[in-house]
């Protein structure tokens, strides 16, 4: 990036204050690979309601500004990736109570995530969040509707202002937090004997 373009970008980052800036918290999916995974020969599904999928959240950024994102929509590709790395087939489930869909697709488990987020910034002149925390509460329900596994995973991501400017990735802290969460989720599901019985 030449000096003039970099200056213009910096100026826009500094002067756009007093509003909520859209970001995404989707991690780099290429880092969530299956090289350390032992496949499970069962089908699985997951449920995210339409309301949750479209729900927008606003949390603090820097300089008195805020960041805005759709946490469930943003984390859905990572959840799909983790489950696809582990299970034979993965489906979006219309409802955890839809017994016909679960039976028709031979689903052994349905995963239901709940997401909480917080953000903050060490910067007072720019809007980007330098720190981001993602909490994933997730449970697995078997064919009978019984909860057979649940856990809460909390991870934080940090990115310096200069790092975000150099990469052009203004949501780097949130991506790092979500990447850490889903790598941990994959490790936990892979090592839990519940899913292999």
Image (cartoon, rainbow, N blue to C red):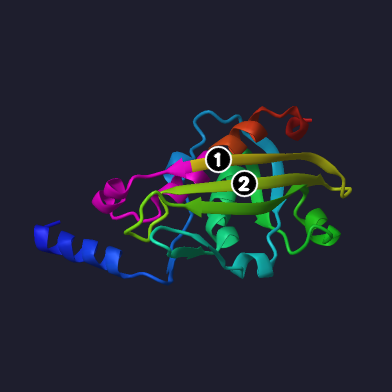
Outermost left residue: 3
The answer to whether residue 95 of the structure is visible from this angle is yes
Quote the CA–CA distance across marks 2 and 1: 7 Å
Q: In which quarter of the image is the C terminus?
A: top right
Circle 1 — which element? Answer: strand
Describe residue 160's horizontal placement relative to residue 182 as left or right. Answer: left
Mark 2: few/some/many CA within 10 Å (<14, 14-19, 20+): some
Which residue is tagged 2? 135
> Could you tell me which residue is drawn at 52 percent across and 35 percent down?
34
> Could you tell me which residue is drawn at 22 percent across and 65 percent down?
11
Circle 2 — which element? Answer: strand
Identify whether 17 is placed above or below 25. Answer: below
Q: Nearer the viewer, residue 109 or 125?
A: 125
Which residue is tagged 1? 155
Q: Which of 22 and 31 is in front in this view?
A: 22
Q: Percent position (x, y) of residue 98?
A: 82, 61
* Quadrant of residue 104 within the rendered picture: bottom right
**Chief secondary structure of the magenta span?**
helix
The answer to whether residue 28 of the structure is visible from this angle is no
Instruction: Tally the numbered discs.
Output: 2
> Could you tell me which residue is drawn at 89 percent across and 48 percent down?
144
Q: Percent position (x, y) of residue 164?
A: 31, 50
Q: Percent position (x, y) of residue 3?
A: 10, 58
Q: Give the range drawn in magenta.
A: 157-182
Q: Percent position (x, y) of residue 117?
A: 58, 53
Dot 2 or dot 1, earlier in sequence: 2
């Amino acid at each position: 990036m030449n000096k003039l373009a970099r200056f213009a970008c910096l100026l826009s980052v500094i002067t756009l204050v007093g509003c909520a800036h859209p970001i995404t918290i989707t991690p780099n999916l290429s880092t969530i690979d299956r090289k350390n995974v032992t496949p499970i020969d069962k089908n699985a599904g997951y449920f995210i309601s339409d309301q949750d999928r479209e729900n927008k959240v606003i949390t603090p950024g820097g300089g008195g500004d805020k960041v805005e994102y759709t946490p469930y929509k943003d984390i859905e590709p990572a959840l799909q990736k983790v489950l696809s790395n582990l299970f034979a087939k993965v489906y979006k489930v219309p409802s955890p109570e839809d017994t016909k869909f679960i039976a028709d697709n031979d689903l052994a488990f349905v995963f239901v995530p709940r997401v909480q987020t917080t953000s903050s910034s060490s910067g007072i002149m720019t809007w980007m969040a330098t720190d981001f925390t993602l909490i994933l509460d997730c449970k697995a329900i078997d064919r009978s509707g019984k909860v057979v596994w649940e856990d809460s995973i909390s991870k934080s991501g940090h990115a310096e202002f200069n790092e975000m400017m150099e990469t052009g990735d203004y949501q780097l802290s949130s991506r790092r937090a979500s990447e850490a969460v889903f790598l941990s989720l994959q490790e936990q599901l892979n090592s839990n004997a519940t899913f292999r019985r």
